[in-house]
Amino acid sequence: MAVLPIRITGDPVLHTVSEPVTDFDDALRQLVADMFETMELAPGVGLAAPQVGVGKRVFVYNWVDDDERLWRGVAINPTLLITPTPTGEADDDDESEGCLSIPGERFGLRRAERAVLTALDLEGQIYEIDADGWLARIFQHEFDHLNGILYADRLDYASCKEVAKAIKKSKWGVPGNSWMPGVDDLDA
Ligand code: ZN
């Protein structure tokens, strides 16, 4: 297993629609194992393949809910059904979202309260999770990555300007930037 560098916003792979997985082989198992290791060290509650430079429809997640239940798995070629996104202003405390590809930043963002994830596991077996709350948010965030969308692309006008400023200040927003969990301290 290996920890992989995490691509930072501006890298084309983060802004491109990923391709479906067709081969459930050793290369895929290796990628997923490396993604789990990278996510845990970062640390993050989710990580999508484009974030480690692989344009495939794969994400991993690892999150403990308020009832101490562990949600941990891999979603391959997922689909996601969501309830309507609430309107109005996001709560900066309860709805604050971050991304390992925009390290160190967090912004309030409204997300659908419920999401039904249907995906394949590493054996190619289909499964479904009916998620709500933060797990539904994680699924929406990671699913977006597979379509080349970052949460920064969904922010309201004021936050959008702020995140653009932060990205410019860090000299991101151009191809070729990445950071290494366990090596770089970017306070993600
Ligand atoms: Zn992200």
Image: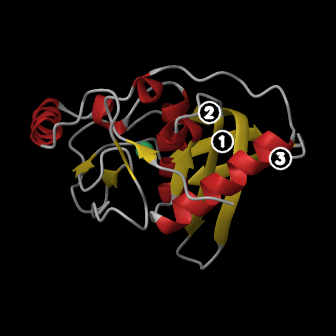
Give, as a three-letter code, the residue at label 1: Val
Q: Which residue is mark 2?
A: 81
Looking at this view, is 66 or 99 the one in front? 99
Labels 1 and 3 touching (C-beta < 8 A)? no
Give, as a three-letter code, the residue at label 2: Leu
Q: Helix, strand, or loop for circle 1? A: strand
In space, the residues marked 2 and 1 are separated at their CA atoms by 5 Å
Q: Earlier in the sequence, mark 2 or mark 1?
A: 2
Residue at the image position 69 percent from the left and 34 percent from the top: 78
In space, the residues marked 1 and 3 are separated at their CA atoms by 19 Å
In space, the residues marked 2 and 3 are separated at their CA atoms by 21 Å
Q: Which residue is mark 3?
A: 122
Give, as a three-letter code, the residue at label 3: Leu
Looking at this view, is 46 or 131 the one in front? 46
Labels 2 and 1 touching (C-beta < 8 A)? yes
Where does the image place residue 17, in percent across and percent down from the top left? Answer: 53, 20
Q: How is the image coloured?
A: secondary structure
Where does the image place residue 135, in percent across and percent down from the top left? Answer: 54, 56
Q: Which mark is residue 116?
A: 1
Q: Helix, strand, or loop for circle 3? A: loop
Where does the image place residue 179, in percent across and percent down from the top left? Answer: 37, 51
| Quadrant position of ligand 1 | top left
Residue at the image position 14 percent from the left and 29 percent from the top: 157
At label 3, counting other C-alpha atoms closer than 10 Å, the crowd grade (few under 14, some 14-19, many 20 or more) is: some
Q: Earlier in the sequence, mark 1 or mark 3?
A: 1
Q: Earlier in the sequence, mark 2 or mark 3?
A: 2
Q: Is residue 17 above or below residue 117?
A: above
